[in-house]
Amino acid sequence: MSTNKMVSALCYFSVFFAPLLLPIVVYFVVEDMEVKRHAKRSLVSHLIPAATIVLFISFAASPLLFGHWNEGSFLFGSGVVWLGFLVAGGVNLVVVIWNVIKGIQVIK
């Protein structure tokens, strides 16, 4: 197995230990274009859960930030907050599974 394949797979598997750091370092350090492509794809896949969480937090906090918060606020109702947590958790799970699959595909 070549070192380039191992580094490419490690970029995908880094979702477990260094989600954003390792693909960025690999992208700027390694000169092989195929490894750079895998590093960029894994970086984008690692940014998706972060973007989902940021969007959920901004959506949930918008009534408080814009002065529309009251006791009966729809966004702070437990149903919508739990739905947001489920969506964010589902997105995170899909991204982790996708990264594991892509890492295994690169190794093969």
Image: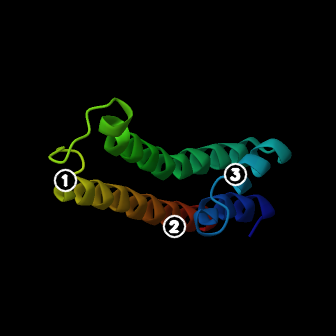
Q: Give the residue number, with chain letter if any, for mark 2.
A: 100
Q: Is residue 31 above or below residue 81?
A: above
Which residue sits at x=36%, y=56%?
88
Q: Nearer the viewer, residue 108 or 13?
A: 13
- Give the number of the disc on residue 23: 3
**Helix, strand or loop at mark 2:** helix
Nearer the viewer's eye, disc 1 or disc 2? 1
- Where's residue 77, x and y in %? 19, 53
Q: How far is disc 1 from disc 2 in space, using C-alphas?
A: 35 Å
Badge 2 local density, few (<14 within 10 Å), some, or many (20+)?
A: some
Q: Nearer the viewer, residue 38 or 82?
A: 82
Q: How far is disc 3 from disc 1 in space, using C-alphas?
A: 38 Å
**Residue 6 falls in image quadrant:** bottom right
Quarter of the rendering occupied by the N terminus: bottom right
**Residue 82 falls in image quadrant:** bottom left
Dot 1 or dot 2, earlier in sequence: 1
Dot 2 or dot 3, earlier in sequence: 3
What's under tag 3, amino acid-wise?
Pro
Nearer the viewer's eye, disc 2 or disc 3? 3
Which residue sits at x=59%, y=69%?
16
**Helix, strand or loop at mark 3:** helix
Q: How far is disc 2 from disc 3 in space, using C-alphas?
A: 15 Å
**Helix, strand or loop at mark 1:** loop
